[in-house]
Amino acid sequence: MEFWATHEADRDKFEVLAFHDPSAKSFAELDEKLKPVIEKHWQGKSLPFPILLDASGATVKRFGIQGYPTNILIDPEGRIVKGGSEVMLKARLAAAKGK
């Protein structure tokens, strides 16, 4: 995840939460499914952010997630920002630096 790596100085201003698709029904199953991702994109290092397991699919449905990967921007008050994206987060981080 390039965004994570290039915004190290701003990590106190945002959080990354990853949802795995509902096909993983246990953390053991999730670990197996993530092995290729960790090898390919993280050079075998542990993921630096939480991976949420949603075995029922209820949270994925509630957030309106239709594909993976998906970005969801949550404001400092904990509200989902409709249409929130990595581009929007970059703009908000840049604006915060300008203050």
Image (spheres, rainbow, N blue to C red):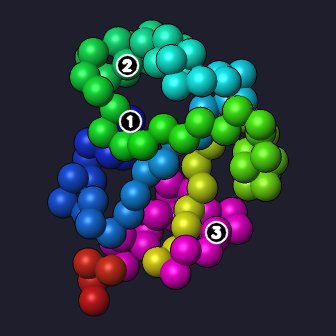
Q: Would you say the residues marked 1 and 2 are in contact, meaning their CB atoms lie under 8 Å apart? A: no
Quickly name the residue at label 1: 1
Q: Is residue 32 depicted above or below 17 in this figure?
A: above
Q: Is residue 10 depicted above or below 54 in this figure?
A: below
**Residue shown at 59% from the left, 36% from the top:** 53
Q: Which mark is residue 38?
A: 2
* Residue 26 horizontal/vertical position (percent): 60, 24
Which quadrant holds residue 48?
top left
Real-space CA distance between mark 3 and mark 1, rounded to the nearest whole angstrom: 21 Å
**Residue shown at 37% from the left, 19% from the top:** 38
The magenta stretch spans residue 84: yes
Is any part of residue 17 visible from this angle?
Answer: yes
* Residue 60 horizontal/vertical position (percent): 73, 45
Left or right: residue 15 versus residue 78 is left
* Residue 23 horizontal/vertical position (percent): 71, 22
Sequence-first disc among 3 and 2: 2
Highlighted range, magenta: 77-95
Which image quadrant: the N terminus? top left
Q: Is residue 84 depicted above or below 1 in this figure?
A: below
Other residues around mark 2 within 10 Å, as few (<14) / some (14–19) / many (≥20): some
Real-space CA distance between mark 1 and mark 2, rounded to the nearest whole angstrom: 11 Å
Extreme residue toward the bottom, this view:
99
Q: Amino acid at mark 2?
A: Ile
Sequence-first disc among 3 and 1: 1
Instruction: Check disc 2 and report its element: helix, strand or loop.
Output: helix
